[in-house]
Image (cartoon, rainbow, N blue to C red):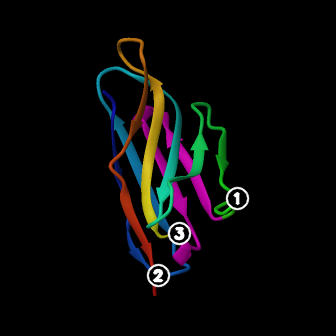
Amino acid sequence: QVQLVESGGGLVQPGVSLRLSCAASGRSFSINAMAWYRQAPGKQRELVATITSDGKSNGAGSVKGRFTISRDNAKNAVYLQMSNLKPEDTAVYYCNARGRNWSGSDFDSWGQGTQVTVSS
C-alpha cells in the first residue's frame, strides 16, 4: 500500500500564494502520474493539475497561469504552487498517485486531503 500525506493548507486572504506538498511512502513502488484534485462544499471532486514521471504537466483551465504543479521523483513528492488565490479556490485539496507497487500490481492512491480556505 502506498500512502500519501498532504500538507500546506490553511486560511489565506485573496491574492496571496500558498504551496501544497504531498509525499508518498510505502514498500518499494514506482510512481507514474501524480495529480492534485479539489472538492469544494457541495461540489464534485475536480482535477486541478497532473504531472507525469518525466515532468509533463497539465492544469485545469480555471487555474492555468495561477497554479503550478511540480514533483521531486527522488523524494516521491508532488507540489502545488498556488498564486493569486481566489475565494472560489476554497476546497479540500487531494493528492493522487498512480503507479506500480512492490508486487507488480498497479495502485491508485489518495491522500487524506488538506483544507484551503481563501477569505478576507
Question: At label 3, which amino acid type do we have?
Answer: Asp
Residue that extends furthest to the top in the rendered view of this protein? 103
Query: What residue is shown with label 2?
Result: 13
Give the mark nearest the N terminus, 3 or 2: 2
Q: Is residue 68 visible?
A: yes
Q: Could you say which is closer to the camera, residue 43 or residue 13?
A: 43
Residue 106 placement, left or right of 60: left
The amino acid beneath tag 1 is: Gly
**Number of marks present in the image shown:** 3
State the CA–CA distance, disc 3 to disc 2: 11 Å
Residue at x 50%, y 51% (from the top left corner) = 37
Whether residue 54 appears in magenta in the rendering, the answer is no
Residue 116 at x, y percent in the picture: 42, 67
Comparing labels 2 and 1, the label whose residue is closer to the camera: 1
Q: Residue at x 40, y 47 (%)?
A: 22
Q: Is residue 57 left or right of residue 114?
A: right
Q: CA distance from mark 2 to mark 1?
A: 22 Å
Percent of width and height locating residue 65: 69, 63
Q: Which residues are magenta?
A: 66-89
How packed mark 2 is, by other alpha carbons closer than 10 Å (few <14, some 14-19, many 20 or more), is some
Which residue is labeled 1 in the image?
61
Name the element at disc 1. Answer: loop
